Amino acid sequence: MNRKVILYIAMSLDGYIAKHDGDIDFLSNVDTPGSDYGYTDFLNKTDTIIWGRKTFDKVLSMVSEVPYKDKKVYVVSKTRKGNHEHIVYHSDVVELVKQLKQQEGKDIYCDGGSEIIAELMKHSLIDRIIVSVIPHLLGGGIPLFREGIPEKKLTFRQSITYPSALVQLWYDVEDINKSAASATSPV
Ligand SMILES: NC(=O)c1ccc[n+]([C@@H]2O[C@H](COP(=O)([O-])OP(=O)(O)OC[C@H]3O[C@@H](n4cnc5c(N)ncnc54)[C@H](OP(=O)(O)O)[C@@H]3O)[C@@H](O)[C@H]2O)c1
């Protein structure tokens, strides 16, 4: 199966995805009429979305109905079960992603947040990172990458600089253990 799990996310230059209280107003600094920073193109290459439960609650607080009705949307939570509109709750993000990777389909969009990113990175289940760096310092908050994520080698793919000064960085995540094993492999 070649479908990738892609983390597509925005962070402040100092590495935060939200303030401690979940505020993400800094993202509006780069709102630009007519530019979605490649988001529509990215969405078209995906058919599945994964949200952490806190990210989903944030989405719910901002919209009148849950978006992405044309996609499979999973919210991972150990406290909620069943469905909410078209979304499905799942209690184990690692198991979920392993299952999805075995299925045919387009790429899988992981939106975060930080807790589920850490869990997926620990299990080497994120294949690509597309991070939009917002020209803003939050000074503290919820970090994109929490302490405890194992060391990873990244392969740079591209950077795109937008007129708003948002810089989008694309990296593929290499598995250090796999790289080391293949480097010493006789074949
Ligand atoms: N800047 C951006 O682009 C961006 C993108 C995404 C999110 N955000 C922001 O990030 C914040 C949320 O991030 P966060 O790190 O606090 O929370 P999160 O990762 O969105 O959600 C954490 C929740 O996910 C569930 N969870 C965690 N690990 C799990 C596992 N192994 N299996 C199953 N469920 C698991 C738990 O839900 P239960 O408590 O229900 O068990 C946990 O409380 C929000 O403010 C959001 O707006 C920003």
Image (tube, grey):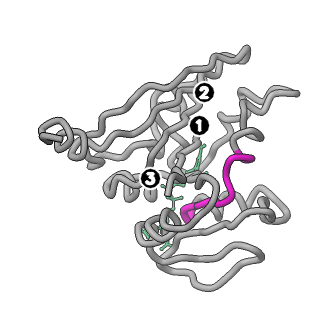
Front disc: 2 or 3: 3
Asked if marks 2 and 1 touch (Cβ < 8 Å), the reply is yes
Where disc 3 sits, the SS reads helix
Q: Is mark 3 within 8 Å of ligand 1?
A: yes
The amino acid type found where label 1 is placed reads: Ala
> Where is residue 15 shown, x and y percent of the image?
46, 33
Residue, x 56% and y 53% (percent of image)?
110
The first of marks 2 and 3 along the sequence is 3
> Residue at label 3?
117
Residue, x 59% and y 37% (percent of image)?
10
Q: Residues within 10 Å of mark 3 (few under 14, many from 20)?
A: many
Q: Which residues are magenta?
A: 43-54
Quick check: 52 left or right of 117?
right
User: Is 45 inside the magenta-drawn segment?
Assistant: yes
> Residue at label 2?
134
The amino acid type found where label 3 is placed reads: Ile
